[in-house]
Amino acid sequence: MTKTIRVALAGAGAFGIKHLDGIQNIDGVEVVSLISRDLDKTREVAGKYGIQHVTTDLAEALAMPEVDAVILCTPTQMHASQTLACLKAGKHVQVEIPLCDVLADGEEVVQVAQASGLVAMCGHTRRFNPSHQWVHRKIAAGEFNVQQMDVQTYFFRRTNMNALGQPRSWTDHLLWHHAAHTVDLFAHQARSPIVQANALQGPIHPTLGIAMDMSIQLKAANGAICTLSLSFNNDGPLGTFFRYIGDTGTYIARYDDLFTGKDEKIDVSAVDVSMNGIELQDREFFAAIREGREPNSSVAQVLPCYRVLHELEQQLK
């Protein structure tokens, strides 16, 4: 494909806007439709980015013959069904993390995607952050092997608000959303499948109906281990912080920044064409469409992560 890739984006919230910002830096891509729940708010966002078509109905955008691809930044509970709708409409699709919150739904997505021949990708952004890419290249070159990952995913989210401080129409989840980043990244960086997983959770929130604190242990087939702590109760710096403990060094990744174990900053500015992990994720999606290949973070590649999450969910029940 050499022509402009025309995209419909569903979800005009905090993460949808991050994708719109990233796409502005990518040549040969145009967002032609914006889909979201609140029509007035959707029109407002569309106006800022010069998007001509707005709707509250994904099916309306999928019926547009000019739409080549869809990016889904919608509530978790919609991800699998909307991904299937995109594939069945003949559109390439990138769905934000998580792929699903029920394993059987994710397995169906992979089956339909493989039969369709379309590009189907899930937004496991950590694979694309320059900090984690830098570590992955050392691993691939045989210069560093992960012995342990120690990860903290912390937010202060005792009410149902999004990253922009606006009320959410859905409830976020530590296991199916936030743990998915680390479970997938651990297997990706260890270059070995997860063979053992354990989880504990704290009290269930009386209003939100979810655990606000969680602890997960993972072990890969090659012996590497991972300890993941997650909380919506942490009153402090927000985000996820990764400590890679390996055979030849220790590295600390904070989103797109990387430090040694002694907190010396490592320059990762030359790792890729951008320092923005979301933009790099989108670049991979569009490159895979143009080149007719499987993308890094395809739905098939990330499905093992959701099998682990399903196993952990069964333990917690």
Image (cartoon, helix red, strand yellow):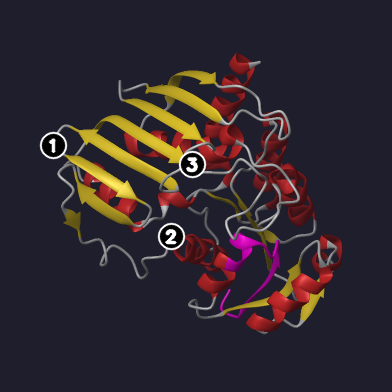
List the residue tagged with mark 2: 277
Residue occupied by mark 3: 181
| Mark pair 1, 2: CA separation | 26 Å
Q: Amino acid at mark 2?
A: Gly
Which range is magenta? 1-17
Tell which circle, 1 or 2, labels the residue nearer the N-terminal end.
1
Q: Quadrant of residue 61?
A: bottom right
Query: Crowding at label 2, few (<14), some or many (≥20) Cα neighbours within 10 Å?
Result: many
Q: Position of residue 279 (x, y in %)?
A: 47, 66
**Residue 196 on image: x %, y %:** 44, 17
Q: Amino acid at mark 3?
A: His
Kind of element beneath mark 2: helix
* Comes first in the chain, label 3 or label 1: 3
Work out whether residue 79 can be spotted. yes
Q: Quadrant of residue 153?
A: top left
Judging by the rendered image, the residue that carries numbered circle 1 is 248
Element under label 3?
helix
Q: CA distance from mark 2 to mark 3?
A: 13 Å
Residue situated furthest front in the rendering: 235
88 relative to 142, above or below: below
Residue in front for this viewpoint, 66 or 276: 276
Residue 2 magenta-drawn?
Answer: yes
